[in-house]
Amino acid sequence: MLTFAFRRILLAIPTLLFISLVIFLLLEASPGDPLGDVPLTVPPEVKERMREALGLGQAWYIRYVLWLKQFFWVEPLHWINQAFGTQLGSGGQRIISFQSRSPVFDVIAERLPQTLTVVGMSYLIGILIAIPIGILSAYRQYSWFDQLGTFVSMVGFSMPTFFTGVVFIIVFAVNLQWFPSIYDTTHRVTDWDSFLRQVRQMAMPVTVLALYNAAQISRFMRASMLDNLGQDYVRTARAKGLSERTVVLKHVLRNSLIPVVTVIALGLPAVFGGAIITEQVFKVNGLGQLLISAIHANDIPMVLTLTFIFAILIVTFTLIADIVYGILDPRIRYD
Amino acid sequence: MTDAAAQTARDRAELIRESAANAAIPAGMALPPDDPVTDVAPTPASRSQWRDVWRQFRRHRGAMVALVLFWGIVLFVTVGPYLWRIDPTYVDIRARNQGFTAAHPLGTDQLGRDMLARLMKGGQVSLAVGLTAMSIAVTLGSLIGILSGFFRRLDAPLMRVTELFLALPLLPLLLLMVTLFREPLGKVLGPGMGTFVLIVTAIGATSWMQAARIVRGDVLGLKEREFILAARSIGTPNRRMVMRHILPNVLSPIVVAATLGIATAIITESALSFLGLGFPPDFPTWGRLLYDAIEQMQMYPWRVILPGVLISLTVLTVNYIGDGLRDAMDPRIRGR
């Protein structure tokens, strides 16, 4: 198991390097010019020097290696220095955004909490809704509850989040005026009232994402439960006189959760991707909104770093899913 | 050697030659080389299988309703424009922001363009994107899946490539590709066509992995079966092996993957349009119509809801059809 985990981590490094190269080359091949907005009155030699200052003068492979060094060496050192007050290799150039001229990671750190609260909450709530629904509709297969649950989850993942989000805004924000339609990120939770306001403004984005996730997870949960309910050990458990509750909620549920847990881990990066759209709908200024504005502004370092962070998330969670699967299911042998 | 024995030997040789010729002729004629999905139905050998699938499919009530609805949507966007002849790009500024009237059954937008006509035109684009992107993805996926399942030497590298693609952050990359290459391609092919080609290739190139994995798994299982061994023993070349023996047998997972692929492609395209990174403004698609209506959704909510409902309905029906097909093609269920 340990050697497997170690080998997978080693394999993840070339994967990530390759992905970063793909993203870098894609940005490199783009015809957009970060100096496109500079007025024409600026003389060409000054423009050339601005180009140098942005670090665009060198060949692409030198810039790629430089970026790698900044991402994997300068930035971690900077965080260590900040955390422990040390002076390790200080003075290294951090990754600077073209747009705001501030370090990319500082901007990301500002935006991260919004995305994490919305995405994290929605995923958690989605799972909490999905698992009981999955259990019930598998246990009572072809009952009206199962039929309804299947239909609703089918509708749930057929409706794109940008549409459900907009419908929610029309119904609950415009017509009923229950919730605000715009997420206020400057809002600070200090007392009970402000906490309630925070809950109210989070309600809609979280619900939209949670319903979408719940629709998918409940399908997996149902299928996995159905697989296990027909197994011989269930009959054995019943035969030795265990209560139905113990059989379903202990024996079957625990075994059915194994594949679902990996599905949950694998789905998390995709949820971050989906959050790009939901953030745009509800005007949450999180990572997704940052990415889109950076793409529009031709802010190459920001786009590169953000996309790469998404890639790291995917690779990490795939790894976690594999390892967790091995831990939860002793029948799985990787060696 | 007696005469009789010689006669038997001659007979046997003739028989072998005859049956070999028989085997060769239909193999050459009935070979479904490029487009097996449409060609399979008329060939007598495989017709019964597809009739079986159809019989089973009809039992799936949800899938049948979905099929009828899907045909309705397809007719709406293809035949509709011939019946409802208002130009979707015709600007009638005096008739702007109208509700449901006789002249404009679904109202008009902020420039007075007829919503019904725009929904039809937008549906054409959305469905075309879905179908084309799906064909690209499924062709690519089946090709890679078959290659890596059939040729052992290609297996490891191709699967590595698949894993790499699965690790790519797809939505951010799609956004990037569309933003970066929309203008240069638009200059070459015209704004509408350029975006179409770009979006279709981008979606196709980033969604073939699931199909490839499923097909590879099936091919690996098939390769161990006796009929493949038999075909191999009479000296079937690799190309015909794949076309005649492997491909027809992995067709059902491919068809299911294709159906579900349409749904994903339609959602992705409308998501791109929704983020303002899809087709140009005068080129309506359902996602674009939704995006354009967002600004005035408080006053004219119908303009948001109609394209959204059409997107959701199409995706829902396609998903149901895929579900029904999967059930119908699963031989474990089919007998019941």
Image: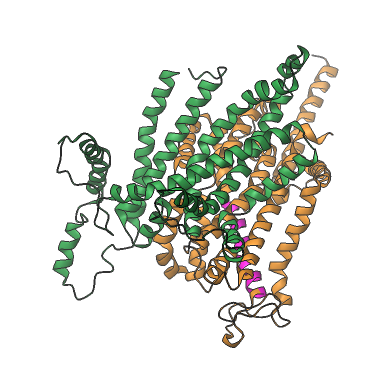
Chain colours: A green, B orange
Percent across and percent down for residue A104 are 29, 50
Q: Name which residue lies at 44% across and 59% down.
A: B178
The answer to which of B16 and B108 lies nearer the viewer is B108
Quadrant of res B301: bottom right
**Place of residue A169 in the rendered image (x, y in percent of width and height, measured from the top left):** 57, 61
| Along the viewing direction, whichever of A74 and B281 lies nearer the viewer | A74
How many numbered callouts?
0
Which residue range is magenta in the image?
B116-136
Residue A311 on the magenta span: no
View extreme (top): residue: A240
State the residue at coordinates (50%, 40%).
A268
Q: Residue B170 appears at what percent x and percent y?
A: 47, 48
Q: Is residue B18 above or below residue B111?
A: above
The residue drawn where x is 28% and y is 48% is A106
Q: Is residue B242 visible?
A: no
Looking at the rendered image, the quarter that the C terminus of chain B falls into is top right
Relative to A76, is A312 on the left or the right? Answer: right
Q: Nearer the viewer, residue B216 or B296?
A: B296
Seen in the picture, residue B300 relative to A107 is either above or below; the reply is below
Q: Residue at x 71, y 16 (%)?
A: A233
For the stretch drawn in magenta, the main secondary structure is helix
Position of A88 with respect to A192 (left or right) is left
Looking at this rendering, what residue extends furthest in the bottom direction?
Answer: B94
